[in-house]
Amino acid sequence: MSTTILLQATQRSKTGRAALAYVERFGWAGLPVHSVKDGLCTCGKPDCSNPGKHPLTRNGVRDASKDPATIARWWHRWPWANVGIATGAVSGFFVLDIDGEQGAESLHDMEHEHGALPASVEQLTGGLGRHILFRQPDFTVANKVWLAPGIDIRGDGGYIVAAPSGHISGRAYNWELSSRPGEVEIADAPEWVLAMLRPARDAGQRKPSGEWQRIACTDAPEGERNERLAKITGHLLRKYVDPFLTSELVQAWNAARCLPPLSVTEVEKILESLAAKELRRRGCKIGEQ
Ligand SMILES: [Zn+2]
């Protein structure tokens, strides 16, 4: 069948029309997902665990397409399908998925602590949830379940069901009146959100390196010597550095940085007590396995 005919057929389906618009106007990657009919998922399983939300194509979100002809072929076949949109780099945005009252409460707490989210494209899910879209940052955003109670992240490899799809509740997904795509810009996520999503490798290098610089690379006056020696010693032992090597290193650090240095015996005491603690920790771990 010609693409023109398929496209015409797609235009007759409400969700097909939306899917085409998402692909053509916004460059998002779409996919057909199951819908809800008479209160049941169209997959026909009465106990479907994800009604109206799971993909119709074999490879699911990996099949998501930006090709209008492909969209038309799918909606010609399944004109009743719900619209899925792949999230992450492929569509240029990730989603803060806020579920129900619990999610709203978590978001309220986070905004109270860090500041309000900027206005962005947003939709109401049929289930009293919200999807807030944010522009893809310069790193990969992974899917994350339970970022906070009731809040998930949909990033690379994930998808959302989009308006005007039907929800199991009987309501339809719809874009917030003042937050429709094409009418408002997808905002950049604020730094505090990005900080929660940066891969651990990046995050791990950032904070602790500054922290270790303060602990290890500056002189330790009286009142800080024991605490800082203990932090360094504990860290080395925790990283499985040999206790004899650890002893040499912290004795040298004591001589170089402590003002005035603790006695050799005092440093040994700290080491012994932390080594015993570390051994207990390892013992516990083995015991648990
Ligand atoms: Zn189903």
Image (cartoon, rainbow, N blue to C red):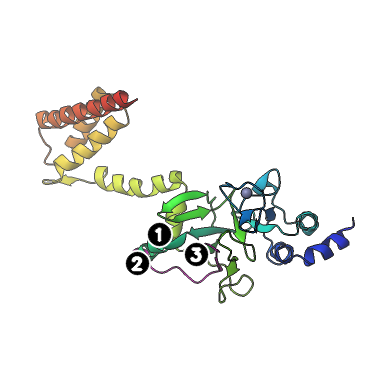
Residue 112, which numbered label? 2
Residue type (three-letter) at the residue carrying disc 2: His
SS for tag 1?
helix
Label tally: 3
- Which residue in the protein does label 3 denote? 128
Q: Position of residue 161 (x, y in %)?
A: 61, 58
Q: Position of residue 277 (x, y in %)?
A: 20, 30
SS for tag 2?
helix
Residue stretch rendered in magenta on the structure? 112-131
Residue type (three-letter) at the residue carrying disc 3: Leu
Marks 2,3: beta carbons within 8 A: no
Residue at 19% in and 38% down: 229
- Local crowd size for mark 2, using a 10 Å CA cut-off: few (<14), some (14–19), many (≥20): few
Q: Is residue 52 magenta?
A: no
Residue 102, which numbered label? 1
> In this picture, is 123 found above or below 213?
below
Q: Nearer the viewer, residue 146 or 196?
A: 146
Q: Position of residue 238 (x, y in %)?
A: 29, 32
